Amino acid sequence: MIEPDGPADEPADVGRRLAIRLVAAAAVCVALAAATYLLLVRTRLGQRFDNAALIGSQQQSLSSRLRDYYFLEHIRAGTFAAFLVVIALCGVIRRRPRAGLAMAGAAFLAVVCTDLAKNQILTRPFLVPSDAIRQNNTFPSGHTATAIGCALALVVLSPPIIRGLVALLAGSYSWIVAADVQTAGWHRPSDAIGASLLAFATIAVCAAVVCWRRPLGEGRRSAHWVAFPVLGVVGVLSAVLSAVNASRGLAILVKTRDSPNPLTPAVLNDAYLFSVNLTVFVVVCLLISLLLVLGKHDLDQPRARPG
């Protein structure tokens, strides 16, 4: 008679291992957000790139800029509150009210921390003349944090069988917002990228707390195979386009770092296109990372009903 290899892992042990992975992913994102701030906000070359992308957005078609402007105008406090209610209701519908409230609170916390960091902590020194175009601090972007935070909260809360589909739908909305805040001229690329990373870190830490304290279930299967090819294609395309524009725009920015002459419209457009495609690539990587970390795990497993 063959003896079993050993007892199966307890749900609490599985939940704690998942919590550790989520916290580790959050720590990586915080480090990347700090690097983004230090390189693009606190250095002369970084500010030149940030501002070149911002000025390059003004060269886009007026119809595109107005469309993005009116789209972003709908993301207000009332809209955000409605998103939070939807997230909480998803938890109630799934018989996971604590997880729903936790993820709604995580999305709210992501936006609050973003605004606090932008207004009180992360200053923007005046290092280059082009920074006079918008001298006030805009890092990180509150609109981007709102979209990314709500999207990732829904991904965490969704059942494993449809989590990939949720990542595609909510994720596509979030990377559109992250790109639109740049096209509309509201934010620099560092603002959108930093906000995306910080929002992921906040959602991941809050999800880790739920995993550590509440029973963890596991779905019979996941539909990530649907999401990974689509996200992979979007990620590869955005990475390739970023590389193409970077090879032209960044090279000239480096060569002319000591030149007082203004950059040409072509370089400004390259900087804008590079920043938008890089932002989409970052958001796609965050979605893929979250799907990989969560796997088939289902947060806050409801207790079995008696009888």
Image (tube, helix red, strand yellow):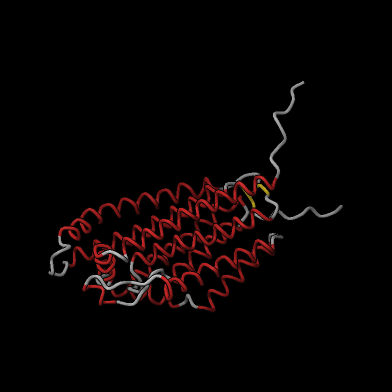
The residue nearer to you, when weighing 201 against 167, is 201
Q: Quadrant of the N terminus?
A: top right
Q: Is residue 137 visible?
A: yes
Q: Position of residue 297 (x, y in %)?
A: 62, 48
Image point (18%, 67%), residue name = 265
Tell whether 39 sits left or right of 304.
left
Q: Is residue 69 left or right of residue 227?
A: left
Horizontal side of residue 159 vs 188, given as left or right: right
Residue at 48 percent across and 54 percent down: it is 27
The residue that appears at 43% across and 57% down in the rendered structure is 283
- Give the residue at x 21% y 73%: 129
Residue 123 drawn at (x, y percent): 36, 72
Quadrant position of residue 254 = bottom left
Q: Is residue 9 above or below residue 304?
A: above
Q: Is residue 251 left or right of residue 89?
A: left
Residue 7's x, y, as percent?
72, 35
Residue 99: percent from left, percent from top: 65, 61
